[in-house]
């Protein structure tokens, strides 16, 4: 059954790279076909409010089941069914409010609607806080008997088993109510960070070599940090991180608030570490997290090989951090208008079958996607699939580059997993675990680059695409594990009672970044202002989220190799995995798909492929010499 607390963090942050805003900033001038049609959710804000008021009035009725759950199978089902229907409508209401707010984060009315839903979700969680403690008082044999007597309870089997598994960490009804009541307050630091960094932050400007003066906000940073002019990208990065550095104390305070929240939940639920608390929600062994961090650290030589290859291809005597986003092959910085991107993405996903691609066509044709940037629009990209009875929605900031096309394919992976799970699973098991959330997305990226490589014979273009694959590994495996190590160390500092200040976070982040990028080995020069980069990472406000990008990438790499090799059984297993939702624990879902994440094999396979790609690139470079 979907967690009611998840209402507070509904939006999936799918895209790894925030995209730029070089197109039309005025939303009114963007064609409707490139904007969401939210009328499928609610015909108007007034209709939304009427539905919200109606649901809000029903919430107290949840209490009528209190003390009745053990009386009969039918009583238990009636309570769970009412919780399910209420949660489903809450999700739909929240999706509408949150997406309306994301269109323009400056509009106070939309923010207020989102805040209203967060308050209602907290109140609902509080009213329903008695449910799990009361279920735990029912003898397990009696629960099994209820399941055999009442067929309608079958859809709650996974939920009931999971409650029993977490019995040692479930509190009394009164204590659970206190934790639920604290939910809205617990999200305050993340909300403050989001509004400040997306809407209110005073970003600076730089004058480019062309004479153009540009604002280096988040969109501008992601547009210009990869500029072909080296001095421009240096100035852009200095400006962006310099601006962040002026508010280090503020960002340190907001992140400390989030850390104290995690510490509170760890202690309240009687876990030994915040990591154990976070991972136990999906029954993931903490060894998976530690193995990833240790395994990536053990393979930094492979990462440094890539960085040295980048330095060579760019013709540089020294590689700076501000060089990491510039195109490897400057003359092949191709443009991909959305019409071309749609064609390439659909063709690349053909190995997954015509039903899969027909749904992708609907996403483009039926306004599931809010495509282009506009002033005030939330940065980045995500897929929102929590409106169970409707299709998912995607937010993109499309800028016409290969990275944007790849992000589009990535988010369509999330969309397809939500669509297929919602279609195949009842609501209580439709929500797929966060641990597997990035498998479908990175799988799609792998299919896209494989398709594009088959279309392009020009050596420079092939080098660019192979380089893009390496960039994906850099951004998804190494960079996200770097983030994961930083997040782990910050939590450990918090657990030890050490101060979490902007200055302390700067030092920790810079030390870890220098290690990953080989600063002391002369691989990459990590300039001092990079120490502020942590303050631009919204994922740090989502508890131990980022490591799952890396584990998902290694899982999808193992799975996509089989599908691309023409293994029909592997393709069917993968589509079945996309349709499985949360019907099993994530480790088991991936085992069914064909990969075991409790072993080192997925990371080892990814590193081998990375070295094979670099071998091919070096051959192409050698053959292109006069």
Image (spheres, helix red, strand yellow):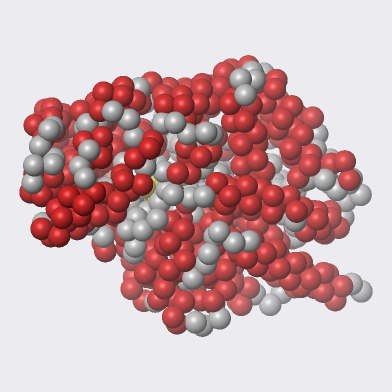
Q: Is residue 54 above or below residue 15?
A: above
Quadrant in which the C terminus appears: bottom right
What residue lies at 27% left-to-right and 44% top-to-bottom? 38
- Residue drawn at x 39%, y 70% as measured from the top left: 575
Asked where in the image residue 486 lies, by quadrant, the reply is top right
Q: In the drawing, does residue 107 fall left or right of residue 291?
A: left
Quarter of the rendering containing residue 597: bottom right
Looking at the image, can residue 312 be seen?
yes
State the residue at coordinates (10%, 58%).
149
82 relative position to 460: left or right: left
Q: Is residue 367 visible?
A: no
* Relative to 282, 548 lies left or right: right
In the image shown, does 292 or 439 lie closer to the viewer? 292
Q: Write the residue at 67% across / 64% down.
A: 604
Give the percent coordinates (x, y) of residue 173.
25, 28
Q: Position of residue 79 (x, y in %)?
A: 13, 41
In the rendered structure, the answer to whether residue 515 lies left or right of residue 111 reads right
């Amino acid at each position: 059954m979907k967690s009611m607390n998840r209402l507070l963090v509904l939006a999936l942050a799918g895209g790894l790279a925030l995209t730029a805003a070089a197109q039309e900033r005025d939303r009114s001038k963007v064609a409707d076909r490139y904007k969401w049609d939210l009328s499928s959710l609610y015909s108007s804000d007034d209709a939304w409010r009427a539905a919200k008021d109606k649901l809000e009035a029903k919430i107290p009725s949840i209490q009528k089941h209190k003390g009745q759950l053990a009386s009969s199978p039918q009583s238990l089902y009636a309570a769970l069914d009412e919780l399910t229907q209420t949660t489903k409508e809450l999700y739909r209401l929240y999706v509408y409010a949150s997406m309306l707010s994301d269109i323009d984060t400056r509009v106070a009315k939309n923010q207020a609607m989102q805040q209203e839903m967060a308050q209602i979700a907290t109140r609902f969680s509080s009213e329903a806080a008695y449910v799990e403690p009361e279920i735990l008082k029912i003898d397990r044999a009696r629960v099994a008997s209820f399941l055999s007597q009442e067929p309608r309870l079958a859809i709650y089997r996974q939920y009931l088993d999971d409650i029993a598994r977490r019995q040692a960490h479930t509190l009394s009804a009164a204590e659970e109510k206190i934790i639920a009541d604290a939910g809205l307050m617990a999200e305050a630091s993340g909300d403050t960070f989001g509004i400040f960094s997306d809407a209110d932050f005073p970003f600076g400007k730089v004058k480019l070599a062309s004479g153009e003066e540009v604002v280096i906000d988040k969109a501008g940073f992601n547009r210009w940090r990869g500029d072909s002019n080296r001095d421009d990208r240096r100035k852009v990065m200095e400006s962006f991180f310099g601006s962040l550095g002026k508010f280090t104390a503020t960002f340190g305070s907001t992140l400390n608030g989030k850390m104290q929240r995690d510490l509170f939940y760890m202690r309240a639920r009687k876990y030994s570490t915040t990591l154990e608390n976070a991972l136990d929600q999906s029954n993931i062994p903490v060894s998976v997290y530690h193995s990833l961090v240790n395994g990536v650290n053990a393979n930094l030589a492979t990462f440094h090989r890539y960085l040295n290859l980048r330095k060579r291809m760019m013709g540089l005597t020294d590689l700076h951090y501000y060089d990491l986003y510039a195109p490897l092959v400057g003359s092949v910085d191709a443009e991909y208008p959305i019409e071309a991107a749609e064609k390439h993405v659909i063709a690349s996903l053909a190995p997954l079958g015509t039903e899969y691609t027909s749904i992708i066509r609907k996403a483009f044709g039926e306004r599931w996607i809010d495509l282009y940037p506009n002033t005030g629009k939330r940065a980045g990209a995500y897929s929102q699939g929590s409106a169970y009875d409707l299709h998912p929605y995607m937010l993109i900031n499309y800028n016409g580059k290969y990275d944007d096309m790849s992000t589009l394919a990535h988010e369509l992976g999330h969309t397809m997993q939500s669509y297929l799970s919602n279609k195949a699973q009842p609501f209580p098991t439709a929500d797929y675990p966060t641990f597997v959330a990035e498998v479908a997305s990175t799988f799609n990226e792998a299919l896209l680059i494989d398709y594009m490589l088959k279309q392009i014979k020009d050596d420079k273009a092939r080098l660019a695409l192979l380089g893009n694959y390496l960039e994906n590994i850099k951004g998804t495996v190494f960079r996200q594990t770097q983030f994961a190590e930083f997040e782990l160390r910050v939590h450990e500092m918090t657990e030890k009672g050490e101060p979490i200040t902007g200055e302390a976070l700067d030092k920790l982040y810079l030390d870890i970044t220098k290690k990953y990028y080989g600063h002391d080995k002369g691989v990459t020069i990590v300039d001092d202002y990079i120490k502020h980069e942590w303050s631009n990472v919204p994922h740090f406000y989502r508890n131990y989220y980022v490591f799952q990008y890396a584990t998902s990438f290694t899982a999808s790499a193992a799975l996509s190799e089989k599908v691309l090799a023409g293994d029909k059984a592997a393709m069917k297993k993968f589509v079945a995995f996309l349709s499985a939702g949360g019907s099993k624990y994530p480790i088991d879902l991936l085992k069914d798909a064909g990969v075991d994440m409790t072993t080192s094999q997925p990371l080892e396979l990814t590193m081998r492929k990375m070295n094979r790609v670099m071998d091919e690139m070096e051959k192409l470079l050698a053959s292109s010499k006069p």
